[in-house]
Image (cartoon, rainbow, N blue to C red):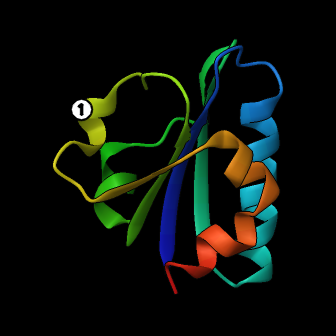
Amino acid sequence: MKVVAITACHTGIAHCYMAADRLTDAARALSIQIKVETQGAMGIENKLSKRDFDNADYILLAAEIKLSESERFEGKKTVLVSVQDAINKPEFLLKQFK
């Protein structure tokens, strides 16, 4: 299974990176392939391509702000969750996709 995720929070300093790390660790534990883009104070990091979105089985958006370059996944089925949920219960979120 392939999941792509974007994490983005209001200040973009810590929480989006914490969410990305927690999702990555949980995906590894669940044997799920994941790529995570962060949209924080440094802008877009680990930018996902349109091809990444096209090849993904699921798109997870852990965001509390408007995402940059959202046209890359327009028309795709996405799941929107809070950044706090991605930090606090990443395994639960990813198990929903299995």
Circle 1 is placed at which residue position? 71
Q: Nearer the viewer, residue 15 or 20?
A: 15
Instruction: Report whether residue 35 is seen.
Output: yes
Q: Furthest-left residue in view?
A: 75
Instruction: From the viewer's side, name the closer residue of 53 and 89.
Output: 89
The relative height of residue 60 versus residue 6 in the rendered view (above or below) is below
Horizontal side, residue 13 vs residue 55: left or right: right
Residue 46 position, x and y percent, is 61, 37
Q: Position of residue 87 (x, y in %)?
A: 78, 50
Q: Is residue 93 left or right of residue 77?
A: right
Q: Look at the picture and state if 60 lies above or below 62.
A: below
Say above or below: 20 vs 12.
Answer: below
Report which quarter residue 71 is drawn in. Answer: top left
Residue at 42 percent across and 22 percent down: it is 66
Residue at image position (31%, 45%) is 50
Quadrant of residue 26 in the image? bottom right
Residue at 60%, 64% in the rendered image: 34
How many labels sit on residues?
1
Residue at 28%, 38% in the rendered image: 72
Residue 21: x percent and y percent? 80, 50
Is 71 on the left or on the right of 57, as rendered? left
Name the amino acid type tagged 1. Answer: Glu
Q: Which element type, helix, strand or loop, lies under badge 1?
A: helix
Q: Please say if 49 is above or below 24.
A: above
Give the crowd class for mark 1: few <14, some 14-19, many >=20 residues within 10 Å: few
Residue 25: x percent and y percent? 82, 65
